Image (cartoon, rainbow, N blue to C red):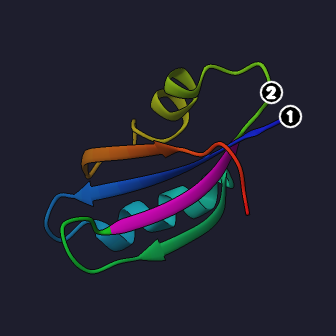
Amino acid sequence: MTTCVFVQLRCKPGTTYRVADEIALREIHSELYSTSGEWDLLLKLYVPEGEDVGHFINENLLDIEGIERSLTTLTFKAF
């Protein structure tokens, strides 16, 4: 069973579209949105079964240049 997580990203000024393009090229997300407010991007992704969530996000997402900060929300049950 996969783990569904939501990741909010704050990007360095002027890099949001470049960061979004790089995420799209990696094809690791289910959905990716530009957002207003404190965070610039919101993505939904599924971490494969048996993978450590933190390692997966660090190794597949947070190495993208331009990401300044992230907030990850784990999910438990969909209603």
Instruction: Identify the residue at horizontal 25%, vertical 57% (top origin).
Output: 10
Q: Quadrant of residue 9?
A: bottom left
Is 34 rendered above or below residue 43? below
Decide which of tag 2 and tag 1 comes sooner along the chain. Answer: 1
Q: Secondary structure at mark 2?
A: loop
**Picture disc at residue 49:** 2
Please identify the dominant SS of the magenta region.
Answer: strand
x, y percent for residue 22: 49, 58
Q: Is residue 18 left or right of residue 33?
A: left
Is 72 rendered above or below residue 43? above
> Which is nearer the eye, 24 or 48?
48
Residue 20: within the magenta?
A: no
**Picture disc at residue 67:** none
CB atoms of marks 2 and 1 within 8 Å: yes
Q: Which residue is mark 1?
A: 1
Classify mark 2: residues with Cα within 10 Å, few (<14), some (14-19) or many (20+).
few
Residue 43: within the magenta?
A: yes
x, y percent for residue 8: 38, 56
Instruction: Identify the residue at horizontal 61%, vertical 19% (top origin).
Output: 52
Is 55 rendered above or below residue 2? above
